[in-house]
Amino acid sequence: MKKVLLLAAISFLVPTVILANSIDETIESYMGPVTRFIEATVFFTVPIGDFDVPFVIIWLIVGATFFTVYNNFINIIGFKHALDVVRGQYDKPGSKGEVSHFQALATALSGTVGVGNIAGVAVAVATGGAGATFWMILAGLLGMSSKFVECTLGLKYRKVNADGSVSGGPMYYLSQGLEKRGWKSFGKVLAIIFAIACVGGSFGGGNMLQINQATQQLAAVTGGENSIFNGNGWTFGVFMAIVVGLVILGGIKSIAKVTDKLVPLMVGIYLGAGLIVLGYHFMDIPKAFMMIMEGAFTKNAAFGGFLGVLLMGFRRAAFSNEAGVGSASIAHAAAKTDNPIDEGIVALLEPFIDTVVICTMTALVIIITGNAPDTRMEISGNIAIGLTSKSFTTVMPWFPPVLSVAVILFALSTMISWSYYGLKAWTYLFGETKAMDYTYKLIYCGFIIIGSAISATSVFNLGDAMIFAMCFPNVLGLYFLAPEVRRDLKEYFAKNKKVVK
C-alpha cells in the first residue's frame, strides 16, 4: 500500500514538471539572490598570497590535520584493523543496530562516491595540473582521521528507538555531547544549524545536482541535441524517482541491502576500466607519477605555482570525500556494534577508497593518456566528464556508454544515501513520526523529477553550498568532543593490544 501511494504521488507531480522549461527563469529569478547570498557566506574567501582561498577548505583541512596528529595518526595505525572489523572478525551477536559494518560503510560510501569522482578530478587536473593529484591524495589521507572522530561520536551518541531503529549523527552528538560539558544551549544551536543545512543539502547537492548531471550524460550518449531525453529529461527523472522511492520506503535496512551490492558493482566497473587503461599504458606509469611529484611542487606560473596546485588538490579531496561534513556519521550510527571506536575505525576507510583510490585512478587515466592540459584551464562539470571520457576512449572507444552507466549508478547511490541523511535531519527537526517520514520521502522524490528537468543553476549551487555549510557546526563541535574520543581510543587499544601490531 505504501508503494502504491508513493507511485500515485509521483504521478501527480509529473504534469507540473513537464512545464519545467517554462518555469526555469522564474525559479532562477527567485532563487538567484538567495543562492548568491548563501554561497558568499559559506564559500567566503581569505587572501593567501595571490589567491582568494575559500575558508571552508582551510576549515576542513586544518581540522583533518589536527585530528590526525591528536589521535596519533589513527589513519595509519588503524588501517589494518579497519579491514578486519569490516570483514566481521570483531562482530558480536546481539549488538544493537540495524546494519552490518560493511553495509554502513557501503551506505556512507555511496553518498560520497559520485559524479565528483569523475568530473571533479578532471577539473582539478585541468586547473591545477598533474601535481594537484599529490595534494588530493594527501588531503584524502588526512580526511580519514576526521571521519574516524565524527563516526565514533555518531555511534556513541546514537538514539535507539523503541522499534529498534536508530537515529544518529551530528545532530545528536553535538546536542548531547556538548550538554555533558555544560553547554546545552550552544550544542542545541549547532545541532539545529547542522540539521537545517543537511536537509537543504539532501534536496540539492545530494539529489537534484546528481540527477541533473546523470540526465545530461544520458542525453549526451543517446544523440546529444537529437536525444529523446533532450528537453524530456523529466521522463528519466520519473523513472529514477520511482526506483529511489521504492528503495527508501524500507528505511536504512532496505537502503543498505541495495548499497552493499551497488557500491561494489559501480566501483568495480569504474576501477576495472581504469586498470585496463593503466595496463595498456603500463610502461608510462612511472612517468605519470614523476609528473605528479614534479607538478606538486611546481613553480610554473601556468598552473598558479605551488600554492595554486596545492589548493586545487586539497579542494577536490575535501569536496569529494566530505570528511568533516558529518554526513557519514548518520549512516555509521546504524551499525550493529556496541563499540563506537570499532565503527569510527571502519569509517576511516571511506576517504581512502573515495579519494586515494577512485579519484587517483581518474587522475592517472587522464595524465597517462596525455589528456592533462599543458596550460591552465577553467572547465565546467559537463566538459570535465567529457575530458575523463576522452581519456578512457583512447584505449576503449566503446567506453562512453559504460561511463554513462557509471555516472547513473553513482548518481543513484548518492541520492539513496542522501535521502537517509536528510530524513534523519528532517525528523530531528520535526519529530520522528510516520507522517514526517513519508512527507520527507515524497518531497525528496519530487525533487528528483524537478532536478532532471530544470537547468536552474542557482538551485544546484544552493544545494552544494548547504552541504558544505554542515562542516562549520560539525567541525567546531568535534574540537570540543575530541578529548573523549582520544580517551576512548586509548582505552580501546589498551584492551586490544593486538590491534596495532
Image (cartoon, rainbow, N blue to C red):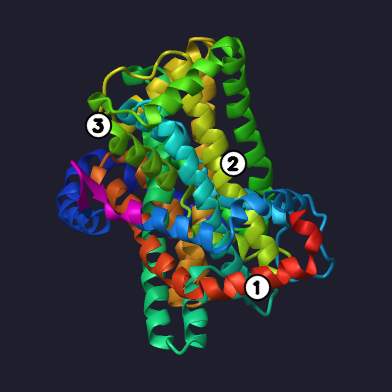
Measured from the top left, where is residue 221 in percent x and y?
A: 43, 20
Q: Secondary structure at mark 3?
A: loop
Q: Secondary structure at mark 2?
A: helix
Front residue of 220/191: it is: 191
Q: How many marks on residues?
A: 3
Question: Which residue occupies the extreme bottom position in the image?
Answer: 182
Kindly identify which residue carries mark 1.
488
Q: Secondary structure at mark 1?
A: helix
Front residue of 311/189: it is: 311
In the rendered image, residue 340 lying in the magenta stretch gets the answer no
Q: Is residue 157 left or right of residue 209?
A: right
Q: Is residue 181 left or right of residue 225?
A: right
Measured from the top left, where is residue 423 in percent x and y?
A: 50, 64
Q: Which numbered tag is attached to residue 353?
A: 2
**Mark 3 residue type:** Gly
Using a 10 Å C-alpha cutoff, classify the residue at mark 2 as few (fewer than 14 neighbours), some (14 to 19) or many (20 or more).
Answer: some
Front residue of 338/434: it is: 338
Specify which label sits upstream in the sequence, 1 or 3: 3
Using a 10 Å C-alpha cutoff, classify the residue at mark 1 as few (fewer than 14 neighbours), some (14 to 19) or many (20 or more).
Answer: some
In the rendered image, residue 56 lying in the magenta stretch gets the answer yes
Q: Which residue is at 60% across, 13% downward?
A: 282
Magenta span: 46-58
**Image position of 229 with respect to 346: above or below:** above
Kindly identify which residue carries mark 3.
304
Q: Which residue is at 64% across, 40% downward?
A: 262
State the CA–CA distance, disc 2 to disc 3: 29 Å
Q: Quadrant of residue 228?
A: top left
Q: Quadrant of residue 353?
A: top right
